[in-house]
Image (cartoon, rainbow, N blue to C red):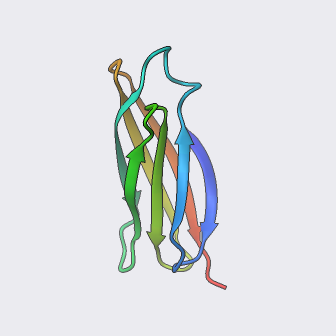
Amino acid sequence: MKLGKFTKTSVERKRYALDYSDWLDTGETVSSVTFTVTPTDTTPLVVDANSISSAGTVVAFFVNYGTTGTTYTVDIQITTSGGQIKEDQVLFVIKDL
């Protein structure tokens, strides 16, 4: 599911958070998360420093770099303590001032 589209500059490092509490079953938590970024180019968008909240319902991550004029797709896949798998997508547009 496409969750949003954000604009950032190539030098900004921004933190984003996804709250899965409304999607999870009662007592279920996020147990793992993976990120895939496309396209990959000479100055790729980098997703790093990801974490899952202590309650197990929020995934936080930082987004760095990127090539000006490029729109990147970040595919996010979570696996839950109940064995569910959810896929989401966020778009990042790189525009410098």
At x 37%, y 74%, the residue is 41
Dividing the picture into quadrants, the one containing residue 32 is top left
Instruction: Give the mark count.
Output: 0
- What is the quadrant of the C terminus in the image? bottom right
At x 54%, y 48%, the residue is 17
Q: Does residue 26 lie above or below 74 as drawn?
A: above
- What is the quadrant of the N terminus in the image? top right
38 sits to left or right of 11: left
Q: Does residue 28 lie above or below 46 as drawn?
A: above
Across and down, in percent, residue 80 comes to 37, 26
Of residues 3 and 15, the one drawn nearer to the viewer in this rendering: 15
97 sits to left or right of 32: right
Q: Residue furthest top?
A: 26
Of residues 30 and 39, the one drawn nearer to the viewer in this rendering: 30
88 sits to left or right of 2: left
At x 38%, y 22%, the residue is 84
Across and down, in percent, residue 8 comes to 60, 70
Across and down, in percent, residue 18 comes to 54, 43
At x 63%, y 66%, the residue is 7
Dividing the picture into quadrants, the one containing residue 45 is bottom left
Across and down, in percent, residue 72 comes to 49, 63
Q: Residue furthest right?
A: 97
Q: Residue furthest front?
A: 54
Q: Does residue 16 lie above or below 53 as drawn?
A: below
Of residues 15 and 90, the one drawn nearer to the viewer in this rendering: 15
